[in-house]
């Protein structure tokens, strides 16, 4: 498999979907290869791509790779987002994770945890009011919160995407059916 040919084939497709290539991995798997494409992007709320965006791009990536000359070996295509386990390595990663809890290891060994309040090209600002230069950061990872405090922003239940209907969980229909029997 030709990594440069794959990159040339996928980058225009990702760009057309408002995504960017974060990582490309080609892993041998018997007679096949697994082509793993990790994507990133701002998404509709500036906080990373949505699952539907990635699924749509994956269909187009598959078609583009089938049409491109990437080698004769059969392959399996896997497309995913960066996820929360990948380290934050660029200012855009911090910007896309506003209000999330982050654990930062500084160059001097100090470990800092806090919420990302803001990020520009040189500094990330954490809650409580701590500014850290990216040049001082050795490693930064998002901390998964099972009980995320409400009111922190777009990660709260997206009320504009809420299709739930309280009537779906109403047991009145079951009672009426019992009465008919």
Image (spheres, helix red, strand yellow):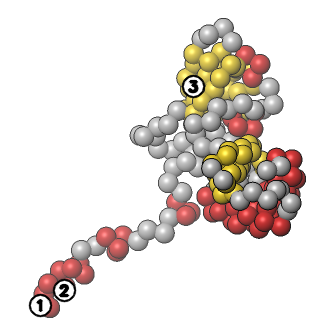
Which image quarter: residue 146?
Answer: top left
Q: Does 154 appear above or below 94?
A: below
For label 1, the residue is 181
Q: Residue at x 67, y 32 (%)?
A: 88
Q: Is residue 175 visible?
A: yes
Q: Residue at x 77, y 47 (%)?
A: 21
Task: Residue 138 in the image: state x and y as whole percent.
Answer: 68, 19
For label 3, the residue is 103
Going from N to C along the chain, the mark reached first, 2 or 3, is 3
Q: How many angstroms separate mark 2 from mark 3 (CA)?
A: 54 Å
Q: Secondary structure at mark 2?
A: helix
For label 2, the residue is 177
Task: Residue 144 in the image: state x and y as whole percent.
Answer: 50, 37
Q: Secondary structure at mark 3?
A: strand
Mark 3 surroundings within 10 Å by alpha-carbon count, few (fewer than 14), some (14 through 19), many (20 or more): some
Going from N to C along the chain, the mark reached first, 1 or 3, is 3
Q: How many angstroms separate mark 2 from mark 1 (CA)?
A: 7 Å
């Amino acid at each position: 498999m030709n990594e440069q040919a794959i990159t040339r084939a996928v980058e225009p497709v990702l760009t057309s979907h408002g995504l960017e290539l974060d990582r490309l991995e080609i892993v041998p798997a018997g007679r096949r290869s697994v082509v793993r494409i990790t994507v990133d992007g701002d998404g509709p709320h500036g906080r990373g791509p949505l699952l539907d965006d990635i699924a749509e791009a994956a269909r187009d990536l598959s078609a583009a790779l089938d049409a491109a000359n990437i080698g004769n070996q059969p392959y399996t295509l896997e497309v995913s987002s960066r996820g929360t386990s990948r380290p934050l390595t660029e200012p855009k990663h911090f910007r896309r994770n506003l209000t999330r809890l982050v654990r930062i290891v500084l160059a001097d060994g100090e470990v800092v945890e806090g919420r990302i309040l803001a990020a520009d090209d040189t500094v990330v600002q954490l809650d409580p009011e701590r500014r850290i230069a990216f040049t001082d950061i050795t490693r930064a990872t998002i901390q998964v919160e099972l009980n995320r405090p409400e009111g922190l922003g777009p990660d709260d239940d997206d009320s504009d995407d809420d299709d739930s209907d309280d009537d779906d969980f109403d047991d009145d229909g079951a009672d009426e059916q019992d009465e008919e029997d």
